[in-house]
């Protein structure tokens, strides 16, 4: 008796042309053309469009404008725009570009892995592990029930990395954050910390200045302070994040 074929209730189509279709083109495709292609695919009704890849421009120069592409496309509600992030650096860049979904991959053979991402399968698994750890931290949807226990020691260093390109060479950022935990939506918490650090960098002396980020527990609250030697001290006690948190 022939077994009955079980079909899934739904199939998700992901259009990968803007990334996989363009990345190997020898002639550089203008950013405006990439944006127009993605917008056209959006209007065509695709539910998911792999928009670009956050990879080394040295190895994949066609994707060097990834952040600009994500900034300029017309995002339609209900349509997802995943981006390829083969390592943690790519994930951090995607996060800064407000990507709403990322894709990771592992090659099936050592030869292809070496040629494609310049590392072994084992090394690629280590890179993906680092990415997925961050995804578990930042991948929750923005909603009232998205809060959970979040370690400041995982969020603060990432915020510092995000502002690194804008940090004057003469400014030193000191982090004094250990095992403090708050109950928070990770994305909301990250954005708050990022904004405070960014504001502190605007006030600090660009020549020999210092920004100190410290977290201390005050009873049932965790206070995060950003001190600079420019305009003074800015503090956030994070009370909107810590209600009901068990330490």
Image: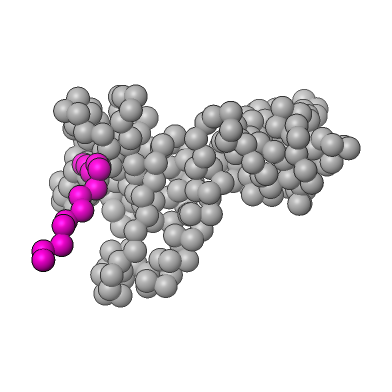
Image-based side of 67 in relation to 133, left or right: left
In depth, the one of 42 and 167 nearer the eye is 42
Q: Outermost residue toward the front?
A: 1
- Magenta segment, which residues? 1-15
> Residue, x 43% and y 56% (percent of image)?
87
Image-based side of 167 in relation to 86, left or right: right
Q: Considering the whole magenta stretch, tell me its main secondary structure.
A: loop
In depth, the one of 43 and 141 nearer the eye is 141
Place residue 16 in its image quadrant.
top left
> Residue, x 53% and y 54% (percent of image)?
133
Location of residue 44 in the rendering, given as x and y in whole percent from the top left corner:
16, 28
In depth, the one of 135 and 18 nearer the eye is 135
Callout count: 0
Q: Which scheme is used to colour this image of the protein? A: one colour
Image-based side of 7 in relation to 193, left or right: left
Location of residue 78 in the rendering, given as x and y in whole percent from the top left corner:
33, 28
Location of residue 65 in the rendering, given as x and y in whole percent from the top left corner:
32, 40
Image-based side of 116 in relation to 227, left or right: left
Q: Outermost residue toward the right?
A: 219
Residue 135 seen from this side? yes
Q: Is residue 236 above or below residue 176?
A: above
In depth, the one of 219 and 69 nearer the eye is 219
Residue 156 seen from this side? no
> Residue, x 63% and y 44% (percent of image)?
155
> Residue, x 39% and y 46% (percent of image)?
102
Q: Is residue 241 magenta?
A: no
* Quadrant assignment for the N terminus: bottom left
Q: Outermost residue toward the bottom?
A: 110
Location of residue 217 in the rendering, given as x and y in whole percent from the top left corner:
84, 41
């Amino acid at each position: 008796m022939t077994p009955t074929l079980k079909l899934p209730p739904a199939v998700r189509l992901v259009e990968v042309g803007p990334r996989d279709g363009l990345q190997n083109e020898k002639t550089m495709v203008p950013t405006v053309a990439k944006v127009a292609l993605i917008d056209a695919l959006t209007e065509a009704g695709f539910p998911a469009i792999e928009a670009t890849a956050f990879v080394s421009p040295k190895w994949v120069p066609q994707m060097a404008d990834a952040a600009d592409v994500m900034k300029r496309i017309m995002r339609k509600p209900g349509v997802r725009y995943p981006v390829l992030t083969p390592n943690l650096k790519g994930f951090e860049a995607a996060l800064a570009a407000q990507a709403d979904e990322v894709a990771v991959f592992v090659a099936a053979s050592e030869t292809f892995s070496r040629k494609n991402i310049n590392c072994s399968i084992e090394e690629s698994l280590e890179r993906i592990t680092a990415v997925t750890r961050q995804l578990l931290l930042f991948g929750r949807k923005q909603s009232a029930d998205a809060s959970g226990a979040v370690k400041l020691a995982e969020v603060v260093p990432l915020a510092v990395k995000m502002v690194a390109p804008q940090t004057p060479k003469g400014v030193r950022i000191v982090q004094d954050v250990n095992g403090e935990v708050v109950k928070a939506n990770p994305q909301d918490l990250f954005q708050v910390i990022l904004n405070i650090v960014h504001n502190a960098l605007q006030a600090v002396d660009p020549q020999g200045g210092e920004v100190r980020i410290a977290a201390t527990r005050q009873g049932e609250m965790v206070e995060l302070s950003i001190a600079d030697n420019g305009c003074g001290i800015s503090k956030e006690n994070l009370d909107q994040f810590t209600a009901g948190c068990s330490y």
